Amino acid sequence: MDDVLLDIGWEGPPVDLMASYVDGHDVYFHVVDGEGDPEVTEAAACRRIWHRFVTAKEIRAGYRLQNAKDLLRYADYQTPLGDRIRLLAALEHEGSATVAECLSIFREVSPMAGLSSLILRRWVTIDLDLELISPHTTVRVFRR
């Protein structure tokens, strides 16, 4: 993350996290206790970098952070081709399915590891903000 910023001449404080959005843009975040330094925002804007200051409270609000932590536990897993094809075919046919329904499709890898891997690699998607991931969470094919 910092390498990208250094490549464009960023001299501000190191960022705390970065989010990559579906539309292709990256947003760099600084976590602050109060107000952020407007000079940092201006420096980012001058370099055409999307930047935001957020509080720790904002980051912890809602379900996204806990869901991300739960999914990232499975970041090292790779879903085998057979399991991936079975799940994608089922979702293409049905339009969507619940997490519980998806788990029964996996044969070659641990079901939660396989599904999490596909979510993290954007083969399928769930709403990370709606609620904690549960058996009735809706899974859909990721559309670019």
Image (cartoon, rainbow, N blue to C red):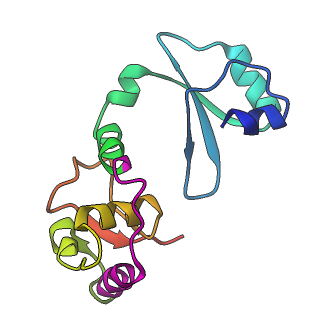
Residue 27: x percent and y percent?
61, 39
Relative to 121, 65 lies left or right = left
* Residue displayed at 69% across by 32% down: 2
Query: Which of the two residues, 42 or 65, is positioned nearer the viewer here?
Result: 65
Q: Is 89 on the left or on the right of 21, as rendered? A: left
Q: Tell me which secondary structure the magenta stretch mostly adopts.
A: helix
Q: Position of residue 95 (x, y in %)?
A: 31, 81
Give percent across and percent down for residue 115: 31, 66
Q: Is residue 89 above or below residue 64?
A: below
Residue visible at 79% across and 27% down in the picture: 10
Tell me how many marks there are. 0
Name the image quarter holding residue 106: bottom left
From this view, report whether residue 90 is shown above or below residue 57.
Answer: below
- Tell whether position 48 is magenta: no
Measured as percent of width and height from the top left, residue 74 is found at 35, 54
Give the answer, above or below, for where 20 lies relative to 36: below
Q: Which quarter of the picture shows residue 44? A: top right
- Determine whether, in the image, residue 30 is placed left or right of residue 61: right
What segment is highlighted magenta in the picture?
72-92
Q: Which residue is pictured at 39% across the width and 71% down the height?
A: 79
Which residue is farthest top?
34
Q: Quadrant of the N terminus?
A: top right
